[in-house]
Image (cartoon, rainbow, N blue to C red):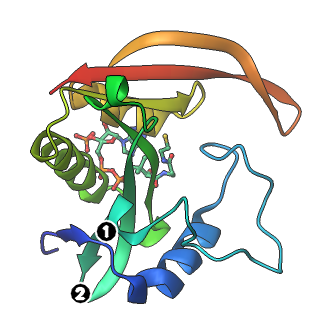
């Protein structure tokens, strides 16, 4: 399999990203209810194309990572947060997720950040292993923060310096 190419999302990626996101939904990573029609737009005023890096393989969008500022406060400008990482079921286990995380680290550095943080559900073993292997450490745990499919699940805060 070839390497994915990573680029900033374009408005024209919206349909592919929306389909990918809905198909990948699971309580392993999402605290939203399972998607049902009518579906909201993928992009809106808080979810802009330039906030997303997409992975393209054989001309298809197979994954994305969303990289944003945590707040608009000048005092918070040195921190970026990963708020969303998804790889399509068919493309998993082939290095796409790792390529997206590495690209987000580079992008955050390029935007002048010195810290990169994220939140991951305690039961999301694949994502936690990926983040740990890319230098993120657990910086806090909100115990039983979500009730998902009848089970209480921790919210784990992870971060790393850039
Ligand atoms: C987490 C996710 C993005 C990983 O994407 P991927 O393209 O399959 O990941 P990669 O192939 O780059 O694997 C990178 C590392 O992730 C970890 N990993 C991936 N799949 C795993 C699995 N099923 N079990 C345990 N660890 C796993 C491993 O550490 C792996 O490194 P290795 O191949 O050297 O063992 C993907 O599984 C996904 O989209 N999951 C649903 C959404 C999600 O959980 N997002 C994170 C929200 S915080």
Q: Position of residue 134 (x, y in %)?
A: 21, 32
The residue carrying mark 1 is 54
Queried on whether the Cβ of the residue with tag 2 lies below 8 angstroms from ligand 1, the answer reads no
Residue in view at x 58 percent, y 70 percent: 44
- The furthest residue to the front: 74
Say what secondary structure mark 1 lies in: strand
Does residue 52 appear in this view?
Answer: no
Residue in view at x 77 percent, y 66 percent: 35
Q: Position of residue 106 (x, y in %)?
A: 12, 46
When the figure is inspected, residue 121 is found, relative to residue 59, above or below; the finding is above
Q: Is residue 53 left or right of residue 157?
A: left
Mark 1 is surrounded, within 10 Å at the Cα level, by few (under 14), some (14 to 19) or many (20 or more) other residues, namely many
Count the marks: how many? 2
Q: Nearer the viewer, mark 2 or mark 1?
A: 1
Question: Residue 22, labelled with which disc?
Answer: none
Say what secondary structure mark 2 lies in: loop
Residue in view at x 13 percent, y 69 percent: 3
Do the CB atoms of the residues marked 2 and 1 lie less than 8 Å apart? no
Q: Position of residue 95 (x, y in %)?
A: 23, 55
Q: Is residue 146 left or right of residue 86?
A: right
| Quarter of the figure with residue 40 | bottom right
Q: Is residue 18 left or right of residue 51?
A: right
| Quarter of the figure with residue 1 | bottom left
Q: Position of residue 60 (x, y in %)?
A: 33, 85
* Distance CA(mark 2)–CA(mark 1): 13 Å
When the figure is inspected, residue 62 is found, relative to residue 160, above or below; the finding is below
The residue carrying mark 2 is 58
- The furthest residue to the right: 150
Mark 2 is surrounded, within 10 Å at the Cα level, by few (under 14), some (14 to 19) or many (20 or more) other residues, namely few
| Quarter of the figure with residue 132 | top left
């Amino acid at each position: 399999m070839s390497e994915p190419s990573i680029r900033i999302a374009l408005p024209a990626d919206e349909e592919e990203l929306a389909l990918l996101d809905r198909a990948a939904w699971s309580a392993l990573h999402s605290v939203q209810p399972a998607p049902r029609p009518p579906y909201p737009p993928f992009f809106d005023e808080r979810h802009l194309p330039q906030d997303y890096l997409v992975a393209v393989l054989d001309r298809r969008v197979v994954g994305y990572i969303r990289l944003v500022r945590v707040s608009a406060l000048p005092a918070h400008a040195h921190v970026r947060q990963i708020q969303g990482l998804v790889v399509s079921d068919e493309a998993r286990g082939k290095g796409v997720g790792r390529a997206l995380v590495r690209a987000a680290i580079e992008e955050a550095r390029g935007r002048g950040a010195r810290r990169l943080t994220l939140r991951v559900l305690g039961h999301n073993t694949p994502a936690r292993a990926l983040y740990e292997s890319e230098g993120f450490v657990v910086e806090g745990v909100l115990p039983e923060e979500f009730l998902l499919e009848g089970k209480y699940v921790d919210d784990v805060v992870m971060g790393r310096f850039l």
